[in-house]
Image (cartoon, rainbow, N blue to C red):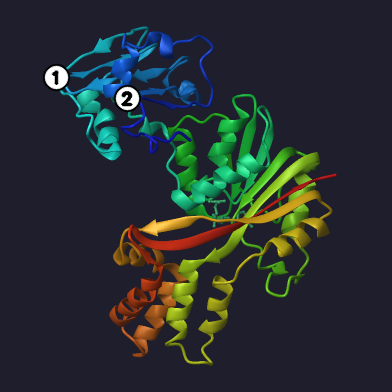
Amino acid sequence: MHSLSSVSCSVSWVHVSSQRRPSTPTNTESQRPGLNARERRANFISITAVHHHTASWLGEHLAVALEAYHPRRVAAQSAHQHLTPDGAAKRGRSRTLSSGQGLQPALSPTAIRKRLLDPKRLYLALSVDDLHPKTWGSYWDHFGKRLVELIRIRPGSSVLDVGTGGGASLYPAAEKIGPRGKVIGIEVCEGCLKRTSAEIERCGISNARLLRMDARNMTFEDESFDFVLSGFIGWDDYFDFESCRPIADDVMMSEICRVLRSGGRVGISGWAVQDESTVLRDLLYEYLPSDSPHRKGIAGWSHRETPEGWQMILSNAGLAKIKTFVERYVEIYPSEDAWWSSSFDGDWKQVAEDLARSGVVTIQALRERAFEMLSRYKRADGIHQVRDAVLAIGTKP
Ligand SMILES: C[S@@+](CC[C@H](N)C(=O)[O-])C[C@H]1O[C@@H](n2cnc3c(N)ncnc32)[C@H](O)[C@@H]1O
């Protein structure tokens, strides 16, 4: 929801935006310590974090302003509450802390972030990061946010997020709709339900909740939602993207359209080119016998969804104003080892372990061969892997 990854030494003032700004100008520029423009430019970074979505948890007007650092000075100012090392919030206090625990302006953004947010150094028990719900990370978060942007969710809307997973689109939707709106996520995976619900609770996100519900059989009334989102839920049971034709009655899309109100919009993402799947598929194909039943499964996992296919799915469901397109995302792994530990998992790993058990190839040999195959993706900054998504939006007439 809030990201500090953009903190950079070359930026004088960095604002971490909030879900909802306070009604009074509490911790905004007016309350900064008196720094002149030259000082700001030369030596200071300010991080202002307003976390109003956590209001229910921390009090009506929680506003934490973390201000200014300098080699010989650290100043932190909080407007309404000052958070003490043990996490207790002292209400109604506004004070500036100065200390000799100065931060060096030459620190890397990561080090700055770590040290700025270290509760012991700055007497802030709650780091800004702690207020962010934890998600699955880069690729998921990127396209989750894109979906919310693309369907232009309005404040105050009701939103359904189908197959919430780690909350990649649920949290940006909650941020967008504000306190008058609501977002409901539905999930069938117990682990996702548990972890994401716990994050919603921990971060005090009062306009979002998660329900255990199968998207093929929803219990919502007709026309309950202004917007429906669904990120990477997979449509293979209903549509063959290779031949671009439906293969079964699309109960999932029928349900989505049923619960969407007239004039409401749907936003879907699906997998397009995925270099990781291509590498793993080619790797395992080298060792699998031609009649291995695994070949069919692998072909399925490494299939690509297409804009043409999504155009047909949405239009068959009676949606209008359809737009489908591919967007690029490149994941950069710092090393082959990093790639292997992230990618060699799940079903791929199981097939590899089958091969190892039957004596065809060892896991170590597979790993070495994979590293050879990765050489074509290697650049100066690491292993580049394309992870494209098909994005599809439509409107219910
Ligand atoms: C690949 S994850 C994507 C999660 C998230 N939407 C995102 O974009 O990061 C797909 C999720 O959809 C859920 N899912 C799959 N089929 C479902 C169904 N029929 N009803 C509800 N959730 C489903 C899975 O459990 C999984 O968590």
- Label 1 sits on what residue type? Gly
* Numbered label attached to residue 199: none
Residue 60, relative to residue 130: is it above or below?
Answer: above
Which corner quadrant of the image does residue 273 belong to? bottom right
Left/right of residue 88 with respect to residue 274 in the rendered view: left
In primary-sequence order, the first of circles 1 and 2 is 2
Question: Is the residue marked 1 within 8 Å of ligand 1, measured from its CB?
Answer: no
Q: Nearer the viewer, residue 40 or 28?
A: 40
Q: In the rendered structure, which amino acid carries the disc numbered 2?
A: Ile
Q: Position of residue 261 (x, y in %)?
A: 79, 40
For label 2, the SS is loop
Look at the image and tell me whether residue 44 can be seen: no
Q: Which residue is mark 1?
A: 100
Quarter of the image that includes the C terminus: top right
Ligand 1 lies under 8 Å from the Cβ of mark 2? no
- Tell me which residue sits at (47%, 92%) in the image: 289
Question: Dots 1 and 2: beta carbons under 8 Å?
Answer: no
From where the camera sits, is residue 361 visible?
Answer: yes
In the image, residue 58 sits, relative to residue 328, either above or below, namely above
Which residue corresponds to the image point at 42% horizontal and 13% vertical from the top-left?
29
Q: Is residue 146 left or right of residue 319?
A: left
The answer to whether residue 238 is above or below residue 18 is below
Q: Secondary structure at mark 1?
A: loop
**Residue 386 rendering spot, x and y as whole percentages:** 49, 62
Q: Which residue is mark 2?
A: 45
Quarter of the image where ligand 1 sits: bottom right
Front position in the image: 336 or 318: 336
Q: How many marks?
A: 2
21, above or below 114, in the image: above
Instruction: Assess disc 1: are there few (<14), some (14-19) or many (≥20) residues with their C-alpha within 10 Å of its C-alpha.
Output: few
